Image: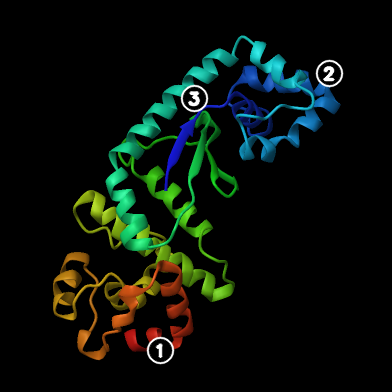
């Protein structure tokens, strides 16, 4: 998976216009545009997907709104802030590229398409995924937990590349993706177990899945005890037949396995 982080004028302006206002100046500008160019403003709303699909060659049918924003005195400062934010995001991504490659190749084991990250201002507080292969990212980086945004992005990427499920099966999918990203991937990055992290409502489900997750990761049965100690997740290993085929599966196949066998897996783990 190859990635690009870019600040694109059209994408940035579109989000400034149609997301929450990030400043009093932007709010007033939006109100002025709406009152003066209502039809053009409405037409601009429809540009979103075209910008995401091919930003290099995107030409708006009517560039009136874009030109006014580009010429506004506050826009240059906003764009510089987005560029600075882009650099900070890129540093986090590049620093953890080795671990992210490990996530995709050794944990997910699926072909993931290339992604373009359209970077906007962090004040917009969003991680949007309008089409496959593209993200809009503008969210505060927590100084104490800067990797959280990395986990969030990878969660969305993987969820998007695995088929959809309904009801309880949807919960199993999310639990397993959390095992991949928030637990195994995060453990690999932090060099200490992160297996108690994630959505609190999914913790019990992940405990039920955990023995099979170890098999999926190719952990020999004789090493289960050391992993249980590391991750502070316990189970009676003697009650589990070792499913050798799991380590040959990709993540989606593993999800299918757990869904097919969920009654057995949950009953076995109780």
- Could you tell me which secondary element the residue under label 1 belongs to? helix
Residue 28 % position (x, y): 70, 18
Mark 3 to mark 2: distance in Å?
Answer: 27 Å
**Quadrant of the rendering where the C terminus is positioned:** bottom left
- Could you tell me which secondary element the residue under label 2 belongs to? helix
Q: Earlier in the sequence, mark 3 or mark 2?
A: 2
- Could you tell me which secondary element the residue under label 3 belongs to? helix
Q: Earlier in the sequence, mark 3 or mark 1?
A: 3
Q: Which residue is mark 3?
A: 82
Which circle marks residue 214 in the picture?
Answer: none
Q: Is residue 141 above or below residue 195?
A: above
Q: Is residue 43 left or right of residue 30?
A: right
* Viewer-closest of 218 and 213: 218
Q: Which residue is mark 2?
A: 36
* Marks 3 and 2 in Cβ contact (< 8 Å): no
Mark 1 to mark 2: distance in Å?
Answer: 64 Å
Residue 255 % position (x, y): 44, 73
Foreground tag (3 vs 2): 3
Q: Is residue 240 above or below residue 16?
A: below
The quarter of the displayed image where residue 268 is located: bottom left
Q: Specify whether residue 197 is in view.
A: no
* Viewer-closest of 27 and 14: 14
Residue 137 % position (x, y): 51, 37
* Viewer-closest of 218 and 45: 218
Kindly identify the residue that appears in the image at 15 percent across and 75 percent down.
Answer: 223
Q: Earlier in the sequence, mark 1 or mark 2?
A: 2
Q: Is residue 22 above or below residue 134?
A: above
The quarter of the displayed image where residue 201 is located: bottom left
* Marks 3 and 1 in Cβ contact (< 8 Å): no
Q: Residues within 10 Å of mark 2 (few under 14, many from 20)?
A: few
Q: Which residue is mark 1?
A: 264
């Amino acid at each position: 998976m190859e990635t690009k982080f870019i600040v694109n004028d059209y994408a940035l302006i579109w989000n400034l216009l149609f997301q929450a206002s990030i400043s009093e100046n932007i709010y007033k500008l939006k109100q002025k545009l709406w009152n003066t160019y209502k039809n053009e403003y409405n037409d601009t709303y429809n540009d979103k997907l075209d910008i995401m699909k091919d930003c290099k060659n995107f030409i708006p049918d009517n560039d009136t709104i874009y030109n006014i924003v580009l010429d506004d005195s506050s826009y240059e400062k906003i764009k510089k802030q987005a560029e600075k934010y882009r650099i900070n995001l890129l540093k986090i991504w590049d620093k953890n590229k080795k671990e992210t490659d490990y996530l995709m190749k050794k944990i997910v084991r699926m072909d993931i398409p290339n992604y373009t990250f359209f970077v906007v201002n962090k004040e917009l507080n969003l991680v949007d995924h309008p089409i496959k292969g593209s993200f809009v990212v503008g969210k505060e980086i927590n100084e104490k937990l800067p990797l959280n945004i990395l986990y969030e992005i990878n969660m969305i990427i993987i969820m998007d590349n695995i088929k959809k499920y309904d009801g309880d099966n949807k919960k199993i999918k999310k639990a397993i993706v959390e095992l991949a990203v928030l637990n195994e991937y995060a453990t690999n990055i932090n060099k200490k177990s992160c297996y108690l992290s994630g959505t609190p409502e999914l913790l019990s489900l992940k405990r039920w899945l955990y023995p099979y997750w170890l098999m999926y990761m190719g952990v020999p049965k004789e090493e289960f005890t050391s992993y249980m100690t590391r991750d502070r997740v316990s189970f009676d290993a003697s009650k589990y037949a070792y499913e050798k085929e799991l380590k040959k599966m990709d993540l989606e196949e593993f999800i299918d396995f757990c869904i097919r066998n969920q009654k057995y897996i949950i009953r076995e783990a109780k």
